[in-house]
Amino acid sequence: MLTVKLEGTIGTFPIAADIEAGVGVTAIYGPSGAGKSTILRAISGLWQPQRGFIQVGENVLLDSHSEVNLPTEKRRLGVVFQEPILFPHLSVRDNLAFGMKKHETGWDGVIEMLDLGELVERMPRNLSGGEAQRVALGRAILSDPQVLLLDEPLTGLDDSRRAQVLPYLERLRDETTIPIVYVSHHRDEILQLADLIFTIDGGTINQELTPGEFRKATQPPTTRRRDDAGT
Amino acid sequence: MLSHLFEPSIWAIVGLSLQVSCVAMIVALPFAIVIGKILAGPGFFGKAFLSALVHLPLVLPPVVTGYALLVVFGRRGWIGSVLDQWGIGFTFSWAGAALAAGIMAFPLLVRPIRLAFETQDRRLAEMAATLGAKRSKRFFKISLPLAFPGIIAGVVLGFAKALGEFGATITFVSNIPGETQTLSLAIYTLLQSPRGDNAALALILISIVLSFGAILASEWMVNSSQRKLER
């Protein structure tokens, strides 16, 4: 279980969040520039809010009252951004192994789940966008994180590539017990993946929705009219 | 003139110059990497001062740098007098010539290294941190290998500068054949003596070949390290 309470400002832009995420996929949905990525950066320790409390399981990562503030490398969070950000001088194998502790198991399972077998000997430059993003996912999972933070992981891909990677995210959700926080402004992705949705606008998380409520709340007006006519 | 190319005394001068320049680079490189990394990093109090200090030998008259070395590292200098008690002396020794060459070459060594760190994608280090890598691992596994082409460029520039150093060397350690008489000093001495022209020409030829070879070698090393990134 991940608990996040944040308050802060970047310049004059306010950021506020109050989120609880359990097993499964918890989505943060909102338009570009709404502050989604900033919240993930705060959770991972790459941005520091003025006030906040972040806890994963029993571990307190940040508590501005008792001045607890673990550095990013001690938070044990797997992060995947919009771009894969693979280490260009390391092979796929070395990228995947970068965050692994010695004698860690799970390699074969992750390679199999994300279909990485054929890629491990390649260099990042020779991967397609979708392949690179799968490697980035695998690398994050192999670092044995307590929570996975996915920041628009499909946004950099075109539609066909997105359709290729999406099933892997579903497998990830169904085959692991790591809580996943999924940030996106794509309604379809969220409908396909999320178990719980927080909506954000203007830097503030303002609603907590079930997938059903989310589907209704975000239905495009044209479809709604057709539905109305049917009933 | 060509007959001079087979004289041992000529090659002793070349050997001494190479020794002085190589030792200067080997000793200066770790300092240059640390200072290049610091100067590429976020601002701090005194950063501009440190940068100015590093670049000072580039703009000061070399004779002034040589005199400053005499004041600091001379037998009665601030540091020199302390080192003298342990039997370490720079004055009138090849080690002093290496020190002078290292100091004079330092700005040229630091500049490309600093640039290599500055232009690095900051997100790579952030990503490494989310994968649990401490500061030292982030430096040695990510920043340093990616800065390699810049380090090579700095070493070659610095090496060429050290090989040709004249003013600071002659001021600090004088012009003693077999001990501190490097290529430039030998060429200067030979040109001053009535029948030295031919020997000087041999040394000039050798120094051109050495400089040219150093630049070719660096091109090759930079290219091959970049190819490794692109493989």
Image (cartoon, rainbow, N blue to C red):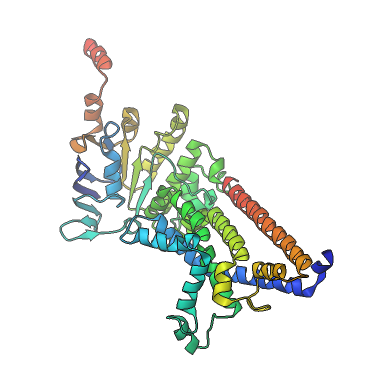
- Quadrant in the picture for residue B94: bottom right
Q: Which x, y percent locates residue A180? A: 32, 44
Question: Can you say whether A92 is above or below B53 in the image?
Answer: above
Q: Does residue A101 appear in this view?
A: no
From the viewer's perspective, tell me whether residue A191 is left or right of residue A202: right
Q: Residue furthest left?
A: A65
Question: Can you say whether B168 is above or below A166 in the image?
Answer: below
Q: Residue furthest front?
A: B194
From the viewer's perspective, tell me whether residue B219 is left or right of residue A165: right
Q: Residue at x 22, y 60 (%)?
A: A68
Q: Nearer the viewer, residue B131 or A163?
A: B131
Q: Residue furthest right?
A: B3
Q: Residue at x 54, y 71 (%)?
A: B100
From the viewer's perspective, tell me whether residue B191 is left or right of residue B180: right
Question: Can you say whether A219 is above or below A154 in the image?
Answer: above
Q: Which x, y percent locates residue A102? A: 46, 62
Question: Can you say whether B45 is above or below B7 in the image?
Answer: above
Q: Nearer the viewer, residue A36 or B2?
A: B2
Q: Which x, y percent locates residue A188? A: 34, 28
Q: Nearer the viewer, residue A220 or B125?
A: B125
Q: Which x, y percent locates residue B88? A: 52, 84
Q: Does residue B174 appear in this view?
A: yes
- Quadrant in the picture for residue A203: top left
